Image (cartoon, grey):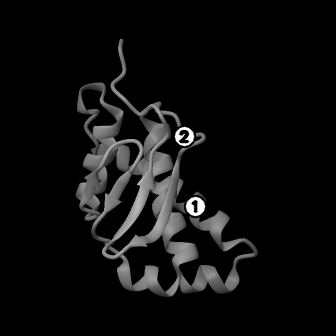
Amino acid sequence: AGHLARTSADPQRDARAAGVEWGRELVEGTARADGDQRKAVLDALTRLGFAPDDEGAERGVALRRCPLLDAARRYPDVVCQVHLGIVEGLLQSIDAPTGPGLGLIPFAEPGACRLFLPDPVVKKHG
């Protein structure tokens, strides 16, 4: 994170791109959760150690733990963009929307960051 922050012309963009690639790779280990895209993303975030607490579309998802907390505190512009990119890559890989509504508010409240998923990331009907 520190290297990217010091050497990249656009560390946020590069961090997000790295996260997207990582998220796409994670899908191989992600069950599709019977077509429930939201559940598939939350399951992947649980496996990564984020302890997501889904509070619904309006309140988003509280990420109660950060597997890179020390680095996130030092380089939030980089680490938090990697995390957002991971979610974006996961969504792309399961054919879920990635447009408006996708966002992450780092350290939004004591003990949690807040993730917002595009609406609707819901069960697919097939």
Residue 107 left/right relative to 102: left
Q: Is residue 93 above or below residue 84?
A: above
Q: Write the residue at 52% across / 54% down.
A: 103
Q: Residue 24: percent from the left, percent from the top?
A: 45, 47
- Give above or below for 19 relative to 118: below
| Residue occupied by mark 2 | 98
Q: Which amino acid does label 1 sit on?
A: Arg
- Mark 1 touches mark 2? (CB < 8 Å): no
Few, some or many residues within 10 Å of mark 2 (<14, 14–19, 20+): some
Q: How crowded is mark 1: few (under 14 residues within 10 Å), some or many (20 or more)?
A: many
Furthest-right residue in this view = 9
**Extreme residue in the top direction:** 126
Q: In which image quadrant can residue 22 be found? A: bottom left
Q: Is residue 110 left or right of residue 108?
A: left
The residue lying at 61 percent from left, 79 percent from top is: 4
**Residue 59 x, y percent position in the rendering:** 39, 50
Residue occupying image coordinates x 24% and y 33%: 33
Dividing the image into 4 quarters, which one contains the C terminus? Answer: top left
Is 91 on the left or on the right of 111, as rendered?
A: right
| CA distance for labels 1 and 2 | 13 Å
Query: Element under label 2?
Result: loop
Q: Please report whichever mark, 1 or 2, sits nearer to the chain's N-terminal start.
A: 1
**Residue 108 x/y as whole percent:** 43, 69
Q: In this view, does 44 lie to the left or right of 9?
A: left
Q: Name the residue under label 1.
A: 16
Determine the secondary structure under disc 1. Answer: helix
Q: Which amino acid does label 2 sit on?
A: Thr
